[in-house]
Image (spheres, rainbow, N blue to C red):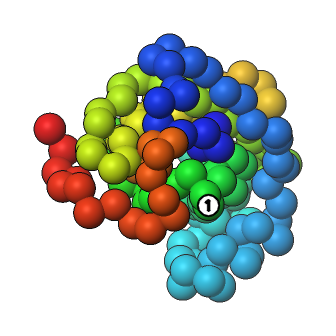
Amino acid sequence: MFDRFFEEYQIGETWTSRARTITESDLVLFSAFSGDWYPLHTDKEWAAQSVFGQRIAHGMLVLSVGTGLTRMDPGVIVAFYGIDSVRFTSPTFIGDTLHVELEIFDKVDKGKAGLVTVKSRLCKQTGEVAVASTLRVLVHKSESTDTPTTAPLATP
């Protein structure tokens, strides 16, 4: 999705990523990296007694997978600007396959760059939305260079 210059995006435009399956190794490695060993993610017997009946992926792991599934051209992106309204709407289990669906929601000219806002949905193979959020990415304009923008970055 983020592989073009600011002027090339159209409000309402959509994009869908490839898919990726969540594995037990993903949960273990994310726990080791983040230090989050909460038993809902790491203790099979404890999680079996939870409302989910089994281990679920960390919410931040799922968000990270979504980032990895989203196309981002380093020659286009100036910086990741933020995430708003993150909602974990359905648990992600070991074995679930996720893909990202993005829709351009807004564009704001910031001088040498532009702010592109997208509605993001990380969806499971069942069609359920696992995570819904709004992402903001600062992208170069076609006439800009690879140097970071010096335009004010405050949100309107």
Q: Which residue corresponds to the image point at 52% horizontal and 34% vertical from the top-left?
A: 120
User: In the image, residue 25 lies at what x, y percent?
Assistant: 82, 71
User: In the image, residue 119 lies at what x, y percent?
Assistant: 47, 29
Q: State the residue in front, 84 or 31.
A: 84
Q: Which residue corresponds to the image point at 41% horizontal and 23% vertical from the top-left?
A: 105
The image quadrant where one finds the C terminus is top left
Asked if residue 126 is positioned above or below residue 140 in the image, the reply reads above
Q: Which residue corresponds to the image point at 27% horizontal and 44% vertical from the top-left?
A: 110
Q: Residue furthest top?
A: 12
Q: State the residue in front, 65 or 48.
A: 65
Q: Residue furthest front?
A: 143
Asked if residue 90 is positioned above or below residue 34 in the image, the reply reads above
On the question of residue 40 being in view, the answer is yes
Residue flagged by tag 1: what amino acid is it?
Pro
Mark 1, Cα crowd under 10 Å, few <14 / some 14-19 / many 20+, is few
Q: State the residue in front, 127 or 84.
A: 84
Q: Is residue 85 left or right of residue 55?
A: left
Number of numbered discs overlaid on the protein picture? 1
Name the residue tied to disc 1.
Answer: 74
Q: Is residue 29 left or right of residue 136?
A: right
User: In the image, residue 146 lies at what x, y percent?
Assistant: 51, 64
Q: Is residue 42 left or right of residue 8?
A: right
Asked if residue 2 is positioned above or below residue 62 in the image, the reply reads above
On the question of residue 86 being in view, the answer is no
The image quadrant where one finds the N terminus is top right
Q: Secondary structure at mark 1?
A: loop
Q: State the residue in front, 33 or 58.
A: 33
User: In the image, residue 65 lies at what x, y percent?
Assistant: 67, 55
Q: Which residue corresponds to the image point at 56% horizontal and 52% vertical from the top-left?
A: 76
Asked if residue 28 is positioned above or below residue 103 in the image, the reply reads below
